[in-house]
Amino acid sequence: MNIHEYQAKEIFARYGIPVPPGRVATSPAEAKKIAAELGKPVVVKAQVHVGGRGKAGGIKFGATPSEAEKAASQVLGMKIKGLTVGKVLVTTSIDVATESYLGVVVDRRAKKPVFMASPAGGVDIEEVARTTPEKIFKMHVDPCMGLLPYQSRFLASKLDQDSKLRGQIASIAHKLWRVFWETDCSLAEINPLVKTKDGQIIALDAKINLDDNALDRHPDLEAMREGESEHDRMAREMGLSYVKLEGSIGCCVNGAGLAMATMDLIKHYGGEPANFLDIGGSSSPDKVLTAMRIICSDPGVKAVFFNIFGGITRCDDVATGIVTALKEIDVKAPIVIRLTGTNEEKAREILGKANLRATTLMDEGVRQVLKIAQEGVS
């Protein structure tokens, strides 16, 4: 689960990580009031779940409350990568001397969290890795031991040569580890971590991704969920794994591995998947119905491909869900079905009564759905 910058900074502040003072505004007048109360020049920052806000014009400066009001009027309501800005963070402007990067993320290959530190902050860490990889320093953390003092000092040494400031940075690194570990993050990042002209170390920006699987332990963090699309909400509540993409082939598959293979095969034959949608290993007809509601509400979908390999998943449950969906939803896109496995014959009987057919070959199903989508025939 992604959270906004202002929410991440609230969590940072709880753990003692220094952040600039500021509050959230939903109107230009509110932004003006906050700027007046802060009593300093401010930065007005769009709060959306995407990067590149600055390049898109979503971060503006205001030397006075009136300028902050004008900046907020320009940012609120604008679209950044398809997302409408409904909130802005109004925070004090900082005199920056240097910018660096500090973050911790799960390294799935090493099966450990890994800290990354770089003196090249303020830009995407992926860009730093691509252009100047020698500026990124990595340190894996034993989850049983946590971040040890010598590791914090090592990270600090890579970010600043001033021994007085290293102590501040090491302390922030330790607190960032506590945020990551105690709130079950998949990512906790400060970019940039800045040194001010008066010698203070401050987290100028904050990014936190929370592990959805651990949210039952953190009801306070679950309450921070914002900006979720209706499709994402429906998928989450029904236990579906769903990611919106930009193609024209709606995909409904059981199992993440098969879903990835399905998308790969669609692209191999020149098509583009409209989504990743995994109904899971034990799917009920209601899950299939919800999946169809999500897929068919996407205007870009020209054809729908069901790819079911029944193991734990029962093919007859999926077939029942498809038939139910056709009765309850205005399905305009043609459907191609590939299924094989548990209760396959029973599933074919159910589909046959609805004048639907299913192939057993994945390759054949993909080529068929692409032909339908390209030619517009069923």
Image (spheres, grey):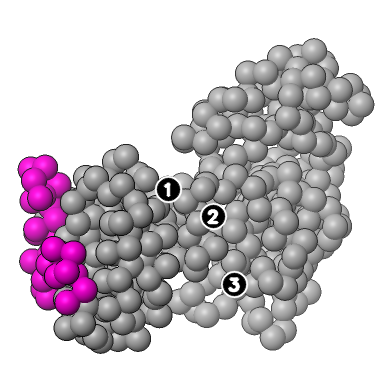
Residue depicted at 69% across the width and 86% down the height: 144
The residue identified by callout 2 is 233
Amino acid identity at mark 2: Arg
Pointer 2 with pointer 1, Cβ within 8 A: no
Q: Quadrant of residue 99?
A: top right
Place of residue 23 in the rendered image (x, y in percent of width and height, measured from the top left): 81, 36
Task: Please name the residue that numbered disc 1 is placed on.
Answer: 131
What residue do we see at 32% from left, 40% from top?
299
> How crowded is the residue under tag 3: few (<14 C-alpha within 10 Å), some, or many (20+)?
few
Q: Is residue 294 visible?
A: yes
Q: Kindly report which numbered mark, 1 or 3, lies closer to the viewer in this rendering.
A: 3
Is residue 137 positioned above or below 150 on the image?
A: above
Residue drawn where x is 64% and y is 72% of the image: 214
Q: Which residues are magenta?
A: 349-378
Look at mark 3 in the image and give the residue it sits on: 213
| Callout 2 secondary element | helix
Residue type (three-letter) at the residue carrying disc 1: Thr
